Image (cartoon, rainbow, N blue to C red):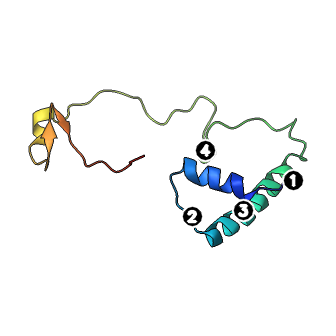
Amino acid sequence: MKITEKEVRYIADLANLNLSDEEVRDYQANLEEILGYVEKLKELDTRGVEPMSHVLFEGSETSTLRVDEPKASFSADQALVNAPLAGAGHFKVPLVIER
């Protein structure tokens, strides 16, 4: 599948990345290779293959990882005692994404 420079720049913009012209060319080639491989995978007959819910977890279909139960924890005040900046019962963090 052919990927255009415009498409690469659009994807980079969605990811908030500033790419050089060389990086755009590299990503364009990489994305074309990845999408070509996906097209090749589409040719496989997977009608007899059962879906898997946990790819890396060996167990039966009804296995669970653990029971989700509430446990005693810190109060909000205890958790915020050493916070460099806190307010309204929350950690305050510096702005990291600007648009």
Helix, strand or loop at label 3? It is helix
Mark 3 or 4, nearer chain start: 3
Query: Decide: marks 1, 3 in contact (CB < 8 A)?
Result: no
Farthest bottom residue in view: 22
- The residue tagged 1 is 40
Instruction: Name the image quarter holding the N terminus.
Output: bottom right
Mark nearer the viewer, 1 or 4: 1
User: Is 78 displayed left or right of 39 in the figure?
Assistant: left
The answer to whether 88 is drawn above or below residue 24 in the figure is above
Q: Position of residue 7 (x, y in %)?
A: 70, 52
Helix, strand or loop at label 2? It is loop
Mark nearer the viewer, 2 or 4: 2
- The residue tagged 4 is 58
Measure the alpha-carbon separation of dots 1 and 4: 28 Å
Q: Position of residue 81 (x, y in %)?
A: 8, 43
Mark 2 or 3, nearer chain start: 2
Helix, strand or loop at label 4? It is loop
The reply to whether residue 79 is in sight is no
Helix, strand or loop at label 1? It is helix
Within-10-Å neighbours for mark 1: few <14, some 14–19, many 20+: few
Query: Decide: marks 3, 4 in contact (CB < 8 A)?
Result: no
Mark 2 or 1, nearer chain start: 2
Q: Position of residue 77 (x, y in %)?
A: 10, 35
Within-10-Å neighbours for mark 3: few <14, some 14–19, many 20+: many
Query: Decide: marks 2, 1 in contact (CB < 8 A)?
Result: no
Q: Amino acid at mark 3?
A: Gln
Measure the alpha-carbon separation of dots 2 and 3: 11 Å
Q: Which residue is at the front of the view, 5 or 77? A: 5
Measure the alpha-carbon separation of dots 2 and 4: 41 Å
Q: Amino acid at mark 2?
A: Leu
